[in-house]
Image (cartoon, grey):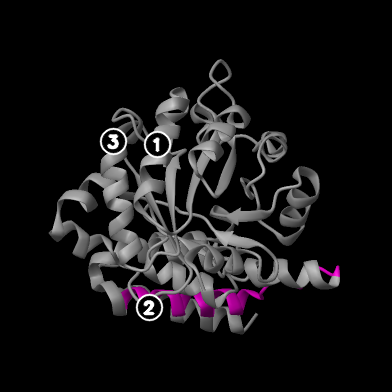
Amino acid sequence: MSATADFFSLLFSGFPIVLAPMAGITDRVFRLVAREGGARLCWTEMLPAPALARSPVARKQLLDFLGEEGVVVQLFGSDPEEMAEAALVVEEAGAVAVDLNMGCPVEKVVKTGAGAALLREPRRAAAMVEAVCRRVKVPVTVKLRKGWDEKSPPAWEIARLLEEAGAKALVVHGRYRHEFFGGQADWEAIRRVKEAVKIPVIGNGDVRAPEDALRMLASTGCDGVMVGRGARGNPWIFTRCQLYALSGQIPPPPSPAERVAQGLKHLALLQALYGDKALNRGRMVLDWYTRGLPGASTLRGQAYQARDFVTLRSLLERYLYQVQTW
């Protein structure tokens, strides 16, 4: 099976829902949990192309997806040749596709000319896609926003250039750079990109439940749905979307006890792979899986006092016992 066929067969095998790249979140453990929840394609956290292109030491630290299946590696950078070299590195490491970040709104990324800054220079963005496509055989995709701002070229115009440059699929987030993740995502922008190109378009933004995913597909005509924040503490969303698409019935959400038990599993995996250096991520995990439950705010306060995973897991184990008595 070719790399291209592998990527698209995974995308379209069942309901086309994938895990978004989220900096500081979609590590190896998060991807494992999402995959167990039904995600067939998982994007990595965005990785710096300059470090991958230049530093063997950085490669050892950053290439955390070795042995995984269905991994799309997202790269960010401003130099086309560095992006191309980094793409070759991740292709050789087993990525089924390379995704170019043209949507990150964070200032420290944008000020280097990377991320969403590329939306201000569509020709440079297209040149970057061309450079990467020349170096790798796996599909090259691009994740972009609806535009830099209201006065800049819109995503549907940029999308045509990216398609001509060789991009095999696009992921469109329906917000401008200055909106970051606030307000409501503009799904109309996704629809307009879909109308502008022939390659597959994956919609992204404000999908938190099965109803959202099917509504996005119906209203935009997009070919797939990417879930980011809606998957935090909610790995069930992938399978629930698939079941809803098949049956027309919304599957019941996990019970409080199921949520907390899954949180404990997630913590155990984090501890096993990263140790106490991942304690801050562990605190986030506890927050995700308990948010909205009785006593969760008190639990979060206790979690931020924990100094190791043993204490953190003990807190959640005691909370699970309480939940099971409700």
Identify the image quadrant of the C terminus.
Answer: bottom right
Q: Main secondary structure of the magenta part?
A: helix
Label 2 Cα neighbours within 10 Å, binned few <14 / some 14-19 / many ≥20: some
Residue sitting at x 36%, y 41% = 131
Residue sitting at x 40%, y 71% = 29
**Residue 305 appearing in the image:** no
Q: Earlier in the sequence, mark 3 or mark 2?
A: 3
Which residue in the structure is indicated by mark 3? 79
Kind of residue sitting beneath label 2: Leu
Marker disc for residue 115: 1
Marker disc for residue 269: 2
Mark 2 lies on a secondary structure that is helix
Residue sitting at x 66%, y 74% = 254
Mark 1 lies on a secondary structure that is helix
Label 1 Cα neighbours within 10 Å, binned few <14 / some 14-19 / many ≥20: many
Label 3 Cα neighbours within 10 Å, binned few <14 / some 14-19 / many ≥20: some
Occupied quadrant, residue 111: top left
**Mark 3 to mark 2 CA distance (whole Å):** 36 Å
Camera-nearest label, 1 or 2: 1
Q: Residue furthest top?
A: 151
Residue sitting at x 40%, y 64% = 95
**x then y, percent, for residue 141:** 49, 49
Camera-nearest label, 3 or 1: 3
Q: Nearer the viewer, residue 217 or 259?
A: 217
Magenta span includes 252? yes
Magenta span includes 171? no
